[in-house]
Image (cartoon, grey):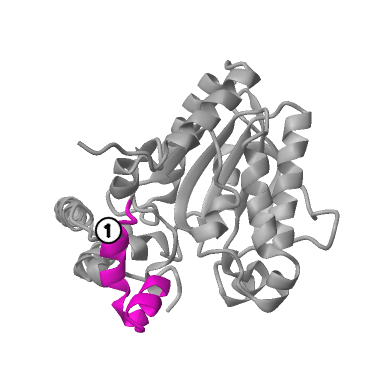
């Protein structure tokens, strides 16, 4: 099934209404204008039902929404929100990793460095992009761009949407763990603002390797966790089919992560998820990023680094009564 006709299981009640609206709109296009009131009523019913469904999603449902093939990816946000994007390639050590894209761009009045994993829309693209799973050279490429941004005093915008770092033998041979650890260490010292947006999947070290920043925004239906639900289920219950149970135990949804203090703010999505109206979703996130750019670019670099350090030192801290 193509991504254009792809529906999640809980979206099936909407399919009949959507088709009925299309059929009536086709008749209106051929001159049957008396059907316009019926179309309006059906659209209102569709929006009401969509709001009901998406207002009661489980954590596992949100994982499915985050993986929807029509959901906007990094390059979609760049195309919609930025101008003059110049993509930069390679880690200057091994090769270019197509699983992550990055380069200079302009967002509003700000010159920025934008970086993020990129998934594909079809099988060919996904193979080329390695399903958004980065190799060590991808993390080293990202770090090179972060340092370049620091050199030219450009804020860094990071979009996170990855099922994890690539776990293959060659990636391990080339130092996957070291590359991720190096990035986490170095990002704590980059002397320009870093704004992170979790737009889909935020899995494990794959996300953390580009996930240290001053502000972390998270889309309403994204997920963020130390491991994917399937990986957790395979370890705990020896059964990947227990992924729904694992997602509840992991508490990986945006409200869970906000409550834990791991993100700063949840960015709402359109009623049917970002895939139902990508332009609206992109614009919603864009407005939040601009607010943070305007605020963070006024802060002295020394103070910014102290604030960043304090932010991460406070994560996971608790007191017992």
Could you tell whether 183 is left or right of 316 in the image? right
- Residue 274: horizontal and vertical position, in percent? 38, 52
Q: Is residue 256 magenta?
A: no
Q: Nearer the viewer, residue 316 or 226?
A: 316
* Residue 200 found in image quarter: bottom left
Residue at 58 percent across and 19 percent down: it is 303
- Disc 1 is placed on an element classified as helix
Is residue 61 among the parts visible in the rendering?
Answer: no
Residue density around tag 1, few if under 14, some if 14–19, many if 20 or more, within 10 Å: some
Up-down relation of residue 195 to residue 177 (above or below): above
The C terminus - image quarter: top left
Nearer to the camera, 105 or 234: 234
Question: Which residue is depicted at the point 68% across and 41% down?
Answer: 186
Based on the displayed image, in which of its 4 quarters is residue 109 positioned? top right
Q: Which residues are magenta?
A: 231-253
* Horizontal and vertical percent position of residue 220: 34, 47
Query: What's the residue at 32%, 73% (across, down)?
Result: 243
Residue at x 24% of width, y 39% of height: 320
**x, y percent for residue 18:** 26, 64
- Residue 275 seen in render: yes
- Residue with the mark numbered 1: 28
Magenta segment includes 234: yes
The outermost residue toward the bottom is 238
Q: Nearer the viewer, residue 300 or 111?
A: 300
Instruction: Describe residue 291's horizontal placement relative to residue 8 as left or right.
Output: right
Count numbered badges in the picture: 1
Q: Is residue 274 left or right of residue 120?
A: left
Q: Would you identify the image quadrant in which residue 241 lies?
A: bottom left
Residue 215: image location, x then y, percent: 49, 34
Closest to the observer, 259 or 290: 259
Q: Is residue 240 above or below residue 178?
A: below
Q: Residue furthest front?
A: 321
């Amino acid at each position: 099934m193509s991504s254009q006709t792809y529906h999640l299981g809980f979206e099936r009640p909407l399919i009949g209404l959507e088709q009925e609206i299309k059929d009536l709109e086709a008749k209106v296009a051929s001159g049957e204008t008396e059907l316009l009131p019926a179309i309006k009523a059906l659209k209102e019913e569709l929006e009401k039902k969509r709001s009901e469904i998406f207002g009661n999603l489980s954590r596992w449902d949100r994982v499915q929404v985050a993986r929807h093939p029509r959901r906007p990816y990094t390059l979609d946000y760049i195309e919609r929100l930025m101008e003059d994007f110049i993509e930069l390639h390679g880690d200057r050590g091994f090769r270019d990793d197509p699983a992550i894209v990055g380069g200079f761009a302009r967002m509003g009045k700000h010159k920025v460095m934008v970086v993020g994993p990129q998934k594909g829309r079809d099988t060919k693209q996904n193979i080329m992009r390695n399903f958004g799973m980065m190799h060590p050279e991808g993390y080293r490429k990202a770090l090179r761009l972060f340092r370049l941004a620091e050199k030219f005093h450009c804020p860094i915008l990071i979009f996170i949407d990855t099922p994890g770092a690539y776990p293959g033998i060659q990636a391990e041979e080339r130092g996957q763990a070291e590359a991720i650890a190096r990035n986490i260490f170095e990002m704590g010292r980059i002397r320009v603002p870093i704004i992170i947006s979790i737009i889909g999947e935020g899995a494990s070290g794959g996300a953390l390797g580009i996930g240290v920043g001053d502000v972390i925004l998270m889309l309403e239906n994204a997920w963020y966790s130390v491991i994917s639900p399937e990986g957790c289920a395979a370890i705990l219950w020896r059964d990947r089919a227990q992924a729904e149970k694992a997602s509840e135990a992991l508490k990986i949804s945006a409200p869970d992560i906000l409550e834990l203090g791991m993100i700063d703010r949840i960015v709402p999505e359109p009623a049917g998820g970002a895939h139902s109206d990508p332009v609206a979703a992109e614009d919603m996130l864009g407005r939040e990023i601009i607010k943070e750019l305007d605020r963070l670019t006024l802060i002295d670099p020394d103070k910014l680094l102290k604030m960043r350090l304090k932010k991460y030192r406070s994560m996971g801290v608790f007191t017992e009564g």
